[in-house]
């Protein structure tokens, strides 16, 4: 019997600070299940620490993207929706954070702020798409090689 790909995670709520924590916890639980499935589905040379680091990196990067929605997307507007979707496909975990607000360029010059995008880029492959209205941030990481092979075989 071939293991099934884990169901996608799909969350939507009003952009508010308590929702960031709720989304972060839900993503961490989902990633824990995904990575447990990876380990159970076949032997791997990846250590538990490597898999935990992958999950931690994605959760931290997603949390930063969600915080940006709360802090910036709806500034001077009524808070609107934010969503987080996560899935595994072809050996890659992708987390997508979206909003329907406005893009705000980081301030020019020295500042103690404006490093979130750089941090996300260090933690995951990061793509930012600006639309009218809204922003889509896609964060992705490849599963360890052995999991990547199994994911392709499951498709």
Image (cartoon, rainbow, N blue to C red):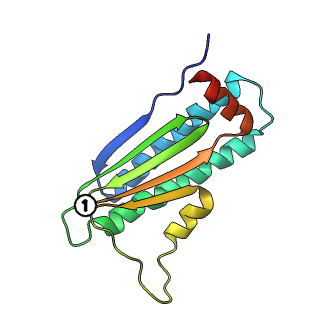
Most extreme residue toward the top is 1
Residue that badge 1 annotates:
133
Q: Position of residue 86 (x, y in %)?
A: 46, 41
Q: Determine whether, in the image, residue 155 is placed left or right of residue 12.
A: right
Q: Residue furthest left?
A: 78
Q: Nearer the viewer, residue 89 or 101?
A: 89
Residue 38, image quadrant: top right
Is residue 6 depicted above or below 115 in this figure?
above
Q: Quadrant of the N terminus?
A: top right
Residue at (61, 50) in percent of width and height? 56
Dot 1 surroundings within 10 Å: few (below 14), some, or many (20 or more)?
A: few
Q: What residue appears at the point 41 percent right and 47 percent down from the top-left corner?
A: 23
Along the horizontal axis of the image, is 96 left or right of 104?
A: right
- Would you say residue 37 is visible in this rendering? no
Whether 128 is drawn above or below 109: the answer is: above
Of residues 31 and 105, which is closer to you in this image? 105
Question: Could you say which quadrant of the image residue 143 lies in?
Answer: top right
Count of marks overlaid on the render: 1
- Vertical position of residue 75 compared to residue 129: above or below: below
Report x, y in % for residue 117. 50, 67
Please give the name of the residue rendered at 56% of the width and 24% of the height, measured from the top-left corner.
155
Q: Quarter-wise, where is residue 48 in the image?
A: top right
Residue 12: x and y in percent read 31, 44
Decide if residue 13 is on the left or right side of residue 1: left
């Amino acid at each position: 019997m071939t293991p099934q790909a884990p169901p996608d995670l799909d969350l939507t709520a009003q952009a508010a600070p308590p929702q960031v924590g709720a989304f972060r916890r839900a993503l961490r639980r989902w990633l824990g299940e995904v990575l447990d499935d990876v380990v159970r589905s076949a032997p791997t040379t990846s250590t538990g620490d490597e898999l935990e680091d992958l999950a931690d990196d994605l959760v931290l990067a997603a949390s930063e993207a969600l915080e940006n929605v709360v802090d910036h997307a709806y500034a001077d507007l009524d808070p609107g929706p934010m969503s987080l979707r996560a899935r595994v496909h072809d050996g890659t975990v992708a987390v997508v954070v979206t909003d329907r607000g406005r893009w705000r360029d980081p301030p020019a010059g020295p500042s103690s702020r404006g490093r979130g995008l750089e941090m996300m880029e260090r933690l995951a492959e990061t793509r930012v798409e600006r639309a009218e209205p809204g922003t889509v941030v896609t964060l992705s990481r490849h599963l360890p090689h052995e999991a990547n092979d199994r994911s392709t075989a499951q498709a």
